């Protein structure tokens, strides 16, 4: 069994991207561990051969028990066969550990405080922290020999996305590996209108595409090809400000909070999803879409005006009920055993985590990256229960990241992310 052809093939298959990730682990402070077993005779030997023969179904049960990203690294670093088992794990949303927190290395820059200045990549650095083990962090930066001034479009599947005029750049937020897609078409308007960038699948997936949204068009690059395709959006001069992937569908919202689905094959099409808001007490002001397993959730930082206490801010959560037509938003009083992770910039991923108590977190809570403007510089994220009153700090004006005009924000802010190796493992 130890010498089966299937296991030999799996141990021999390792991409250059995985090698880069392994190098980053060796250089960083996040460590791996070697698994050993004790035989009946009492002697200790390396378990790399015996552990490689464990069935994927058993390894998946072990993966579900992992409580931190550090332990995930230890698991994937045990042997090639264990890493291959991670590749067949159903979904990134089934992991029980939280995303890493990214903090830009430098003073916070509020939206528009520097006008429309481009991001200087030569000084672009950030720290990645595992919130389950706060003493572990990794400092990263954009690799050298890249265009210096570019604009940040968002983070997707562990990659930062940058553009400037016809140039585009992808940077792995964990390893620093960079990818230079082909030049964008001339007169693409991307430099003159708000935009957002996303990968439709892990970069190593055979059908992965990079999508860039301008005011008028969506630009599509299938990874590995030499050209872009342009698709008109016809949104009446409204813009797209969030993109999520739900049950193999690409869903986008525009500034009027209309929900659309995008289909890339066999040809591009965009259709509006009928949604009624009549079941809500008030329209959401600052909504985020969050995919949580088979649920599509909307988180809103709501405002309530009282007669004596003034305004109160708190988080509300809604679930989109697709069982009726038109679909409708249903308010959830509690998240039960879930925790949600969002950043103020909706171009960054929002993720969910089940049973957060396993790693020391809290259920029925929203973890927000850098919510308060006057917070301690070291307090770069906040956790609040759903419905709980937000403390009377100076809350960032989230409208600046969403609906305000001009809405463009070209800096990298505090955010949550899973490294690309996690997304690549859960296809």
Image (cartoon, grey):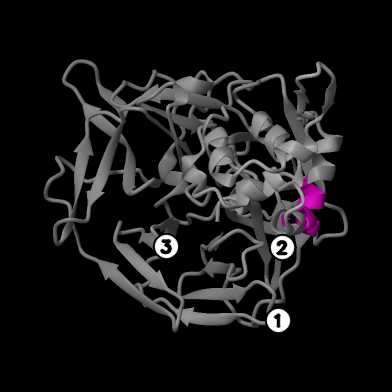
The residue wearing badge 2 is 169
Q: Quick check: marks 3 and 1 in contact, CB under 8 Å?
A: no
Question: Secondary structure under badge 2?
Answer: strand
* Magenta span: chief secondary structure: helix
How would you rate the neighbour count of disc 2 (Cα within 10 Å): few for under 14, some for 14-19, many for 20 or more?
A: many
Task: Using the image, determine if residue 302 lies above or below residue 293.
Answer: above
Tell me which residue sits at (29%, 61%) in the image: 258
Residue 224 pos. (x, y %): 69, 75
Between 116 and 8, the residue placed more toward the observer is: 8
Is residue 111 rendered to the left or right of residue 144?
left
User: In the rendered structure, which segment of residues is drawn in magenta?
Assistant: 10-21
Residue 384 pos. (x, y %): 40, 23
Disc 2 from disc 3: Cα separation: 26 Å
Observer-side mark, 3 or 1, equals: 3
The residue wearing badge 3 is 248
Observer-side mark, 2 or 3, equals: 3
Task: Using the image, determine if residue 115 lies above or below residue 393.
Answer: below
Residue 199 pos. (x, y %): 57, 62
């Amino acid at each position: 069994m130890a010498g089966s052809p299937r296991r030999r093939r799996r141990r021999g298959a390792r991409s250059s991207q995985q090698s880069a990730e392994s190098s980053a682990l060796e250089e960083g402070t996040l460590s791996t561990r070697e698994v050993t077993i004790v035989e009946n005779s009492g002697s200790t030997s390396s378990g790399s051969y015996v552990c490689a023969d464990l069935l994927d179904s058993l390894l998946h049960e072990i993966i579900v028990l992992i409580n931190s990203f550090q332990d995930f690294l230890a698991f994937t670093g045990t042997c090639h066969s264990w890493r291959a088992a991670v590749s067949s794990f159903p979904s990134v949303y089934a992991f029980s550990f939280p995303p890493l927190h990214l903090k830009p290395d430098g003073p916070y820059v509020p939206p528009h405080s520097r006008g429309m200045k481009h991001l200087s990549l030569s000084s672009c650095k950030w720290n990645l922290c595992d919130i389950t083990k706060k003493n572990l962090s990794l400092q990263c930066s954009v690799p050298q020999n890249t265009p210096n001034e570019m604009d940040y479009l968002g983070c997707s599947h562990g990659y930062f996305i940058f553009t400037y005029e016809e140039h585009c750049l992808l940077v792995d937020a964990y390893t620093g590996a960079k990818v230079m897609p082909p030049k964008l078409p001339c007169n693409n308007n991307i430099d003159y209108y708000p935009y957002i960038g996303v990968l439709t699948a892990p970069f190593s997936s055979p059908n992965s595409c990079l999508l860039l949204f301008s005011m008028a068009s969506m630009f599509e690059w299938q990874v590995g090809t030499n050209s872009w395709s342009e698709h008109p959006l016809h949104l009446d001069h409204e813009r797209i400000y969030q993109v999520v992937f739900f049950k193999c569908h690409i869903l986008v919202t525009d500034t009027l909070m209309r929900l659309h689905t995008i289909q890339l094959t066999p040809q591009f099409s965009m259709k509006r999803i009928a949604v009624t808001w009549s079941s809500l007490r008030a329209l959401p002001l600052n909504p985020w879409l969050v995919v949580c397993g088979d649920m599509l959730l909307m988180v809103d930082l709501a405002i309530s005006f009282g007669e004596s206490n003034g305004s109160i801010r708190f988080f509300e959560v809604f679930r989109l009920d697709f069982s009726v037509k038109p679909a409708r938003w249903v308010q959830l009083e509690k998240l039960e055993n879930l925790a949600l992770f969002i950043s103020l910039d909706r171009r960054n991923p929002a993720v969910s985590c089940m049973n957060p108590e396993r790693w020391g977190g809290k259920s029925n809570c929203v973890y927000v990256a850098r919510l308060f403007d006057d917070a301690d510089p070291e307090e770069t994220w906040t956790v609040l229960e759903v419905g709980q009153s937000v403390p009377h700090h100076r809350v960032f004006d989230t409208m600046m990241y969403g609906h305000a005009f001009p809405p463009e924000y070209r800096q990298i802010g505090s955010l949550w992310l899973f490294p690309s190796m996690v997304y690549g493992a859960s296809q």
